[in-house]
C-alpha cells in the first residue's frame, strides 16, 4: 500500500512539474505579446505625432519603444530558458531552447525593421 501512495505522489509531482513547464511557455508567449504591444505603441506614436516639429522627436520616442520591445523579447527568452533548464518534462512535450531563440530572433528582426521604417518615413 505504501508503494502505491508513493507512486501516486510521484505521479502528482511529475504532473505538477509538467504544468509548470507549460506555464513557462505561456509566460514566454505573454512576454512576446507585451513586446509586440510596445512595437504597436511605437507605430501609433509615430502616426499620431508624425507631423510634429522637429521630426526627430516622435521618431526618437518611437525608437525607445522598439528598444523596449527588443529588451522584452530577449529577457523573455533568457527567463524561459533558465526556467526550462531547472525543470524536467515527464509527459508534456515542451518547446526547445532553440525555438525560444528562433522566435526571439524573428521578433527582433521585425522590431528592428519597423524601427528603420519609422525613421525613413
Image (cartoon, grey):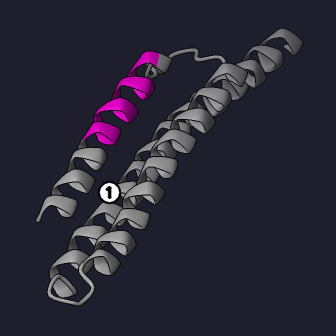
Residue toward you, 58 or 23: 58
Residue nearest the viewer, comparing 103 with 5: 103
Residue, x 29% and y 48% (percent of image)? 111
Q: Residue 103 lies in magenta, yes or no?
A: yes
Q: How many marks?
A: 1
* Lateral position of residue 42 relative to residue 95, left or right: left
Q: Main secondary structure of the magenta part?
A: helix
Measuring 46% from the left and 22% from the top, which residue is drawn there?
94
Q: Nearer the viewer, residue 25 or 4?
A: 25
Q: Is residue 94 above or below residue 69?
A: above
Point out the image quarter for the C terminus. Answer: bottom left
The residue indicated by pointer 1 is 36
Residue at point 77%, 24% (across, down):
9
Name the residue furthest top: 3
Give residue 18's position: percent from left, percent from top: 58, 27
Please name the residue shown 51% across and 40% down the image. 74
Q: Is residue 56 magenta?
A: no
Residue neighbourhood size for the residue with mark 1, other residues' Cα within 10 Å, grouped as few (<14), some (14–19), many (≥20): many
Q: Which residues are magenta?
A: 98-109
Amino acid at each position: 500500500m505504501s508503494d502505491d501512495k508513493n507512486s501516486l505522489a510521484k505521479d502528482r509531482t511529475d504532473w505538477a512539474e509538467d504544468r509548470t513547464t507549460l506555464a513557462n511557455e505561456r509566460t514566454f508567449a505573454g512576454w512576446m505579446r507585451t513586446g509586440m504591444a510596445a512595437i504597436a505603441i511605437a507605430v501609433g506614436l509615430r502616426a499620431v505625432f508624425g507631423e510634429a516639429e522637429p521630426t526627430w522627436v516622435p521618431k526618437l520616442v518611437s525608437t525607445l519603444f522598439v528598444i523596449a520591445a527588443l529588451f522584452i523579447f530577449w529577457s523573455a527568452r533568457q527567463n524561459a530558458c533558465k526556467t526550462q533548464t531547472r525543470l524536467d518534462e515527464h509527459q508534456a512535450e515542451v518547446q526547445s531552447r532553440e525555438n525560444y531563440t528562433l522566435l526571439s530572433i524573428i521578433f527582433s528582426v521585425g522590431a528592428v525593421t519597423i524601427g528603420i521604417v519609422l525613421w525613413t518615413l
